[in-house]
Amino acid sequence: MKAFFFRHHGKWQVFGIVTSVLVIMLLSCQTVSTPTAVIPPTAKTIPTAFVPGDCDPSAQPIEMNTSYNNHITGGPYPETCPMYCLWTPKGSQLEIGLSDFSINLDIYVDQNLSVADYSDFGQWYSHNASETGSEVVTIDNPDGRFYIQVCAYSSNLSDETDFTLYNNFTP
């Protein structure tokens, strides 16, 4: 009978004993474990990112929750009225507004391009008596595409102003 030793962490350990018939292995220095799979907790549904749809080529696409500085002049309708396009997912509220202008501006918001089609949200919003300030359109439960048209109330080409177009979407 012979014993085999090895050094582990500074101590001599018995590795095995050999007899004339049988080899006995003693592994006293370390326990070997079988790897087990780590199963993550049940995954939560992650909403997919919102992807806006197409806009009419006559409308400038704008993003949700942004503001844009613009310039407008008076003139014939609708040639001098810029058109914007905003897409939203289903939400609780959408606010679209104009601010920081010095002549009377009007804002029109509709889900269709036709100004004459009032079957959804389409309507003109406020003719600001003071001709300066702000105009706001609030839509409850928005979902989909919205066209926004901004027009100077005056047809006089010498009337012009800078303005800010903004929108705030609440999911």
Image (cartoon, rainbow, N blue to C red):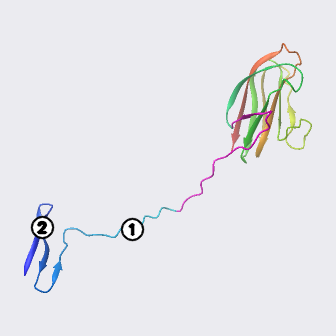
In the shown orientation, is residue 100 left or right of residue 76? left
Sequence order check, earlier mark of 2 and 1: 2
Number of residues whose C-alpha sits closer than 10 Å to that of mark 1, classed few (under 14), some (14–19) or many (20 or more): few
Q: Is residue 52 magenta?
A: yes
Tell me if residue 149 comes above or below residue 117 in the rendering. above
Amino acid type assigned to the residue bearing label 1 in the image: Thr
Residue 70 % position (x, y): 73, 23
Residue 12 location, x and y as percent?
10, 66
Q: Secondary structure at mark 1?
A: loop
Tag 2 residue = 6
Residue 102 in magenta?
Answer: no
Residue on which the image places disc 1 = 36
Please state if 117 lies on the left or on the right of 60 as rendered. right
Question: Left of 51 or right of it: where is 55?
Answer: right
Which residue in the rendered view is the most extreme toward the top?
A: 158
Which quadrant is the C terminus positioned in? top right
User: Is any atom of residue 142 visible in this view?
Assistant: no
Closer-to-camera residue (8/169): 8
Q: Please state which of residues 141 and 44 is positioned toward the viewer in this rendering.
A: 44
